[in-house]
Amino acid sequence: MRVSTERQGQSGLGLEAQRAAVAAHVAARGEVVAELNEIESGKRSDRSELVKALDIAKRAGAVL
């Protein structure tokens, strides 16, 4: 899950909505391998949590 501002991250609303959408999607398809949260602009290319998520997904053969 990712939100772009500290305020969104602190409110939890953006993250909670994303978490609910992921749970609904996964319910009929499998399981969540890992959950990472990031509060960072999507424009940045140096996003450590994205790098971790891609690595985990690749190793697990999972969809990100």
Image: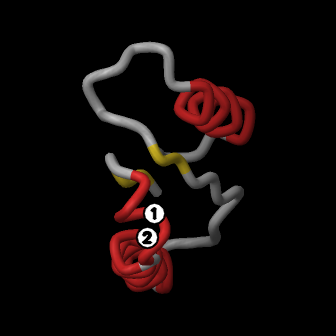
Q: Earlier in the sequence, mark 1 or mark 2?
A: 1
Residue for point 32% across, 47% down = 4
Specify few, some or many for label 1: CA neighbours under 10 Å numbering under 14, 14-19, or 20 or more.
some
How far is disc 1 from disc 2 in space, using C-alphas? 7 Å
Residue 33, image x, y percentages: 70, 58
Q: Which residue is mark 1?
A: 9
Numbered badge on residue 15:
2
Element class at badge 2: helix
Element class at badge 1: helix
Q: In the rendered view, would you say 50 is above or below 22?
A: above
Q: Nearer the viewer, residue 27 or 39?
A: 39
Residue for point 44% across, 80% down = 16
Amino acid type at image mark 2 = Leu
Q: In the rendered view, would you say 3 is above or below 13?
A: above
Query: For residue 18, which quarter of the picture?
Result: bottom left
Do the residues bearing badges 1 and 2 touch, measured as CB atoms within 8 Å?
Answer: yes
Q: Is residue 13 left or right of residue 60?
A: left
Amino acid type at image mark 1 = Gly
Residue 35, image x, y percentages: 65, 59
Q: In the rendered view, would you say 3 is above or below 26?
A: above
Q: Nearer the viewer, residue 23 or 11?
A: 11
Q: Nearer the viewer, residue 37 or 40?
A: 40
Q: Residue furthest left?
A: 43
Residue for point 46% across, 75% down = 19
Residue 62, image x, y percentages: 58, 46
Q: Is residue 44 left or right of residue 9?
A: left
Residue for point 53% across, 32% down = 50
Q: In the rendered view, would you say 64 is above or below 30?
A: above
Numbered badge on residue 44:
none
Residue 43, image x, y percentages: 26, 24
Query: For residue 60, which quarter of the picture?
Result: top right
